[in-house]
Image (cartoon, grey):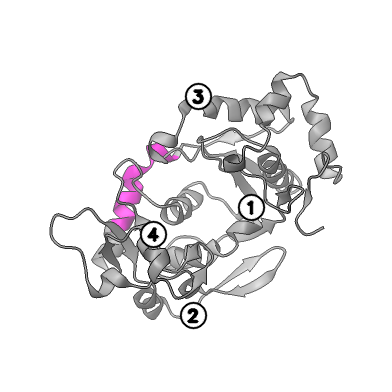
Amino acid sequence: MEVTRFAPSPNGPLHLGHAWSAIVAHDLARNSDGRFLLRIEDIDGARSRPDLADSFRADLAWLGLTFEEVPAQSSRVDAYEVAAATLAAMGLLYPCRCTRAEIAAAARATGPDGPVYPGTCKADPPGWGETAAWRLDVAAALARTGPLTWHDALAGEQQARPDLAGDVVLVRKDADTPASYHLAVTLDDAADGVTLVTRGADLFGATHIHRLLQELLGLPVPRWHHHALLVDEQGRKLAKRRNSPALSDRRLAGEDGPALAAALRMGQLPGGIRLASA
């Protein structure tokens, strides 16, 4: 019996790519007589819009997907703080004041999240009182855990390589965004009892970091299922920042949601849209 989840951020409307991800997770759970969870990831500071969460619920119901809603991220801030304090007590976090522009200029490699942080503040930490993010010292963390593996349902057994991403941020500078995606999603999936983390292939690389955090914090280790992405005519993944057409527009226009879901399952995609692996 699999427990899967769909975990959108309310910083823009859902689009067909989200519909595809939700359908994959929903069907994997239902096919095993399991549970399909909805979790609202609403700690993106001022960008999070509470009104969109209601739209998300309506979109999923319109597609014919039944779900069980679990607590939103905003209710879990205390757990994130406890986990960060635990890692800090292990000596695995250090403060960083670098901007994205500074990292891009100094980076010597590119990882799953973009330019790999070159460790500037590990050698030259911020002064007292400076606003700082907190980064995970990945080398020290791996020295503590030793080699790790994780399993993807499509790609098979993987050797964990969190070093490829560099020392990622776990606690952000912005007080309105108390934890990074890496820390929050790892803790959330454990708290919700997720057994099969179902998400897009664009997050495959992030899993190396999540596996490391699970080991450090003594969390259960699920399996993963990184599905292919829907892309547009230019081969770009559908995205909020590109203003991909909203599901809510289709829903409010009276389109048949279950019929759309059935078409997506059969690979019958709207004009110009295709699966990235196709």
Please report the bounds of the magenta region as a residue range: 73-84
Q: Position of residue 88 (x, y in %)?
A: 26, 63
Front: mark 1 or 4: 4
Closer to the chain start, of discs 3 and 2, is: 3
Identify the mark nearer the N-term, 4 or 2: 4
* Distance from the alpha carbon under mark 4 to that under mark 2: 32 Å
Residue that numbered label 2 is attached to = 147
Query: Hey, what amino acid is under mark 4?
Result: Ala
**Local secondary structure at mark 4:** helix
Residue displayed at 48% across by 41% down: 41
Q: At 77% from the left edge and 28% from the top edge, which residue is drawn?
A: 257
Between marks 4 and 3, how big is the CA–CA gap?
A: 33 Å
Q: Nearest to the eye among marks 4 and 3: give it.
A: 4
Q: Nearer the viewer, residue 39 or 138?
A: 138
Q: CA distance from mark 1 to mark 3?
A: 25 Å
**At label 2, which amino acid type do we have?**
Pro
Q: Earlier in the sequence, mark 1 or mark 3?
A: 3
Q: Which residue is mark 3?
A: 51
- Binning the other alpha carbons within 10 Å of mark 1 as few (below 14), some (14 to 19) or many (20 upward) gives many
Disc number placed over residue 101 in the picture, else none? 4
Q: Amino acid at mark 3?
A: Asp
